[in-house]
Image (cartoon, coloured by chain):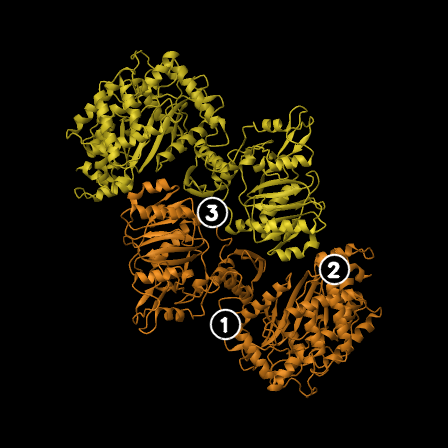
Chain colours: A orange, B yellow
Amino acid sequence: MNFKKMLENEQIKPYLLKARYGVEKEGQRVDLTGKLAATTHPKTILMSNEHPYIKRDFSETQLELVTPVTDSLEELFDYLSAIHEVTYRSMDKDEMIWPLSMPPGLPADEKDIVLAKLADPEGVRYRELLAQEHGRRKQMISGIHYNFEFGEELIQKLFKAQSEITKYHQFKTKIYMKITRNYLHYRWLITYLYGATPSSEKNFFEDKSLDQPVRSIRSSKYGYVNCKDIQVSYSSLEKYISDISTMVEQGRLLEEKEFYADVRLRGGNKVSDLEERGIRYIELRNIDINPFEQNGISYQQAEFLHIFLIYMLWIDESEQHDDWVTEGEKRSEKVALEHPLAITEFKAEAEAMLNEIEHMVENFELSVSENLFDTLREMVTDPSKTLAGRLFKQSEQSNQSQVATRLGKAYYDEAWNNPYQLAAFTDMELSTQLLVFDAIQQGIEVDIIDRHDQFLKLVLNDHEEYVKNGNMTSKDSYIASLIMENKTVTKKILHKQGFRVPQGEEFNDLANALRSYHQFSTMAFVVKPKSTNYGLGISIFREGATYEDYTQALTLAFKEDSSVLIEEFLYGTEYRFFVMNDKVQAVMARIPANVTGDGAKTIEELVAEKNKDPLRGRDHRTPLEKIQLGELEILMLKGQGKQPSSIPEKGEVLYLRENSNVSTGGDSIDVTDHIRDDYKNIAVKSVAALGAKISGLDLIIKDIEVPAANDNAYGIIEANFNPSMYMHIFPYKGKSRRLTMELLEYLFPELIKK
Amino acid sequence: MNFKKMLENEQIKPYLLKARYGVEKEGQRVDLTGKLAATTHPKTILMSNEHPYIKRDFSETQLELVTPVTDSLEELFDYLSAIHEVTYRSMDKDEMIWPLSMPPGLPADEKDIVLAKLADPEGVRYRELLAQEHGRRKQMISGIHYNFEFGEELIQKLFKAQSEITKYHQFKTKIYMKITRNYLHYRWLITYLYGATPSSEKNFFEDKSLDQPVRSIRSSKYGYVNCKDIQVSYSSLEKYISDISTMVEQGRLLEEKEFYADVRLRGGNKVSDLEERGIRYIELRNIDINPFEQNGISYQQAEFLHIFLIYMLWIDESEQHDDWVTEGEKRSEKVALEHPLAITEFKAEAEAMLNEIEHMVENFELSVSENLFDTLREMVTDPSKTLAGRLFKQSEQSNQSQVATRLGKAYYDEAWNNPYQLAAFTDMELSTQLLVFDAIQQGIEVDIIDRHDQFLKLVLNDHEEYVKNGNMTSKDSYIASLIMENKTVTKKILHKQGFRVPQGEEFNDLANALRSYHQFSTMAFVVKPKSTNYGLGISIFREGATYEDYTQALTLAFKEDSSVLIEEFLYGTEYRFFVMNDKVQAVMARIPANVTGDGAKTIEELVAEKNKDPLRGRDHRTPLEKIQLGELEILMLKGQGKQPSSIPEKGEVLYLRENSNVSTGGDSIDVTDHIRDDYKNIAVKSVAALGAKISGLDLIIKDIEVPAANDNAYGIIEANFNPSMYMHIFPYKGKSRRLTMELLEYLFPELIKK
């Protein structure tokens, strides 16, 4: 079958870069000095080995991080990054992940390497057998497994372009068998470029069998390989299956999965499934952990592997399948054992191959990272640019363990830097990022079905839930959200149920509203558009208004909405009650932007100082916003006889804003434990009256010490159907309330039972 | 207590016109010739006498229409109008409502007047006693009862402005007692202006006791009054209560409610409740039906009654309460029995009173209808302008019965003219109007809590449901609506469940989309913005596209939304499946605007002819839209080698639009009974997969005769979370599917059990 020709079809090109990916990445838990952790697997990560993303491999210290299958490399790396961050922030604060494939210094007695403490007795038994068969030391090597499947449409189109094979699954198998043989033949290039295990740490070798640095211990005979006599033929799928089965039957392999090939053919639970269903995807297992990447693999590596696999399909192979593979093995072994700074024996071939791949990429109009091939060619010319070369050179200045510890610490710092976000998902809302974090930690599968729209699908076993914006769920009814969205309807319902809401009226035209002037002229009142939310078009009159001011306020409000509300103004502090499932989960006081004087610093300096808080940022990327010193703030200061250069007295509190929104620099203060129960009861009952399950209820309370039953003690301003959760989780002051976790437990009550 | 002074306070003024209203209006069912109906109460009106809006009074033919309590006169008349329309359209098509207080010609033998056939034996027994006591004839008189309550805020403010009375309910009682006495004293003015029963019809009087025309038979001793010895004192509430109780005890009244006063004091189920709770509102009962109004009372009448009641509070009264009332009774009787065209004996006093009321209105800055007082003064000067005068004068030309029949028929026509709407609610969406119609018919209380926002509260006994836009309810979850709102999420979920959706991709920037040109270049595809709905920014390529056209289409689409979908174009007809509660309720084919030639008329003439259909209108005020002949239609004709002046052949169908939206003149054709069950199953299962309960699913089907399992037989385009219902209820062709009724039965399953 002439794949070369088939691939060169115009209709095929758009599909060549469409594929599905998955990565598994192992790594040892160590303390911040690089010493193997003595602790058990983190308690905050539930579900031990049922966890879809964070597992234990051979030993109790060996993490295995697993991404879901993704449709793009971007997604793959986003998940990889998020899973890493969750793992870091779930571990003890004085632990990190060792950034090398070769394990950190091991105990002198390999018996002190603790096997993974799994609940499942089968898993424990298998590890005991492995320890017996291969020794515990070798099992401590970590690596990257790169799972790859061509897009269905590509295979379909290729299938239709030929007539030789009539069964689709056989055709797929043919494709992946060719790729696998070619990959095994040419894998030495990958070993050269991405090999990254030049040296081992203390006690890895019992017998000092390897005493000079190489490109990849892991890919060599000293690494994680089967013994010489385990040989499997890739000449056909049938042969491959029967070879493995025979060896398991003969007891030469403990299990099928003990066959440590550089490429594993995948497509079922058991190898024999492959025959019936065909190969669905392949797993590249010869990738060392890249020490220079927090994720252990770079985007360019993953991208090149994809292109390399297209090339493996494109170039011809030898008809002598077994020899072809064996020759590849020999070459890879040679390259693996070359000195990390030595020019490789296969330099000329490497250069030719890269040129040919680049030509193919251009010919197929594949869009790849800029400089991809320049970088690769440089690595061929200059071995110190390869991963092994870089690690070796850096280690020369101190030692490999110190380099690894330094790199590991840097990734650790990065993961802990902004604990309120997921670095790969900062384009999403903070509350959604936190929910994704908690879901990953709890072992709930997260499918981001519309990232732009904050739309998640969460799956735990057979239980599916959809969530939008962090808190829009199946728990609320459609009409409850619409009730909350409509301020007039909300007020009418609450009023009817006997709750105190600001009195007022809705107007649909200016003339009517003007006619009602006398109704409001001498009271404290607010004019606001009915449905906008961000303070636009709102005027507050604390002591009545002249007819002129009244007219102007109405004109402003009608610019924002065709319906305008005039309501009594309620005196007091605004509290946000976050109610979920008939319970007050958190109460937050929101205080307008302010600074407190120290008798020395100017207002400007005090603002700058307060803005240093890492929780303060801009554009809702952080839990709090930086305080501005703009027109409004300066006006507000002027009203108090101050300016930015004024020096407030020690302890003097200066407000810089009238409104208390966190988005304009306000402070969020958790007061959940300080609010009287009667107010909490009102909040719970109000939300129930609206028929809602998740709501952020805003109450004005005159004095939280005073009973709610007192005259005008409180008023309910509005019910928010999309209340933010992050501000309760990262308040300016007070206790953090992990609402995203509460939400998960509400959606998945089975989590609590575990 | 000086109410005059208290009312003149600036702070009181804004509240004087705030009040709560309710109207009960009786009326006899007659056939279209004005003959008393021989039929029973309409079967479509459920719940017999438990019905909140449409009841039977004394006889089986006597309707009693009852509005809910409203906060404004506008609302009051809207409900009155809607209840009338529902009543008309629930009656036999050859019946109408007699527009006079005096009944139509009665049977010679009063035994042939059929008492209301109530299920409740108490009610039947009471009517039998009434018939025995007063005779059946008198009970056939109909009237208007006008219920009035001052706004709570007004009473509160007046209460706080005095210190004489310390109990709020006693203060309220004082107000209403004064108003009642003054009203009874001055009611002759109302009798003069609004009396409208100059003559009776055949067999009303057994003995011809009244043989000349008067102003108001009903308000005179010949009307619906208790016998002379039934006298009750209004000097105090205690006296009033004890007088009535005594008469009931003595058997001089059958029940408390048999006391037919012109003003009834209200505030509890029994008269004795009044003592404890105070008077809550008053019921004016001396209002004849206004024959010149479909609703039996005009807005100006209701408005004047309100002002008249303020005046009753404002003006002084005599300390001799009983004499004061008795004098009023005498005057009213005199006025009632004056000739309808005679100048009234109390002309000078009437004029003085109107001037004083007008002066009060100006002084209080009350906004009232223009010309209100000019009109009233004219009625005083010229008796032929009074209601009795007008009816009498018109009757002189033929006879009263003919005039009444003609007026009744006009109201009947009005009610039937646009059966798809409620005349008072045409500012609301058609589906909501139809839902309100059905709710009223079913006896479900309808509270329009936000008219502008189509927000209804429906109540049946203790069961409350909120509905927005006719079909957004508590039955759907919040997340299901958000899933349907998001086309990408909808498609992903349906695709995963194995349903056929158009293949395609979402792009968030132009560059990425352009790069995918080859993926679509040779297929039939559609470019569309992700979230707009009205066809804006959509381009269809039926046979692939050049790169230039592709670029242009994308540029257009990105103008509408930051996310753009490119999808395969599906060939076939678009069908809307309306799914509710896991059942396909209706299926509609939507056909682009078109005309069918007759071999004689031009396209322009054919369009004009088709547009005559009363279902076709503009701006969604009717179930179908008029076909336009604008730029797009002319372009479309041009493509077929035609122009508006072309004459299509007989039977030739010409399409004037590419899109099939009803909003651009398309035809809606009900095909519910013609669609294969497999497509219906797909619709039900798809909607279930989205977790939705109410959804309008759009399917493209190639051929509805072909099984859905066939290759590419169908594709699901989108799921609408706010599907319109009216187009299924009033289709262009095919069977009407009363979805609003189905919705009510879904929300209130107890309706079906009845």
Amino acid of disc 2: Arg
**Residue A733, placed above or below residue A332:** above
CA separation in Å, label 1 and label 3: 41 Å
* SS for callout 2: helix
Q: Residues within 10 Å of mark 2 (few under 14, many from 20)?
A: some
Q: Earlier in the sequence, mark 1 or mark 3?
A: 1
CA separation in Å, label 1 and label 2: 46 Å
Q: Locate the N terminus of chain B by quadrant.
A: top left
Horizontal and vertical percent for residue B234? 20, 30
User: Residue beneath label 2, please?
Assistant: A277
Q: Is residue A570 toward the left or the right of residue A135 in the image? A: left
Residue lying farthest left? B319
Q: In the picture, residue A367 is in which quadrant?
A: bottom right
Mark yes or no: residue B105 visible. no
User: Residue beneath label 3, please?
Assistant: A479
Q: Residue at x 61, y 46 (%)?
A: B538
Q: Are marks 1 and 3 on the same chain?
A: yes
Amino acid of disc 3: Ile
User: Residue beneath label 1, please?
Assistant: A417
Q: State if disc 3 and disc 1 touch (CB < 8 Å).
A: no
Q: Residues within 10 Å of mark 3 (few under 14, many from 20)?
A: many
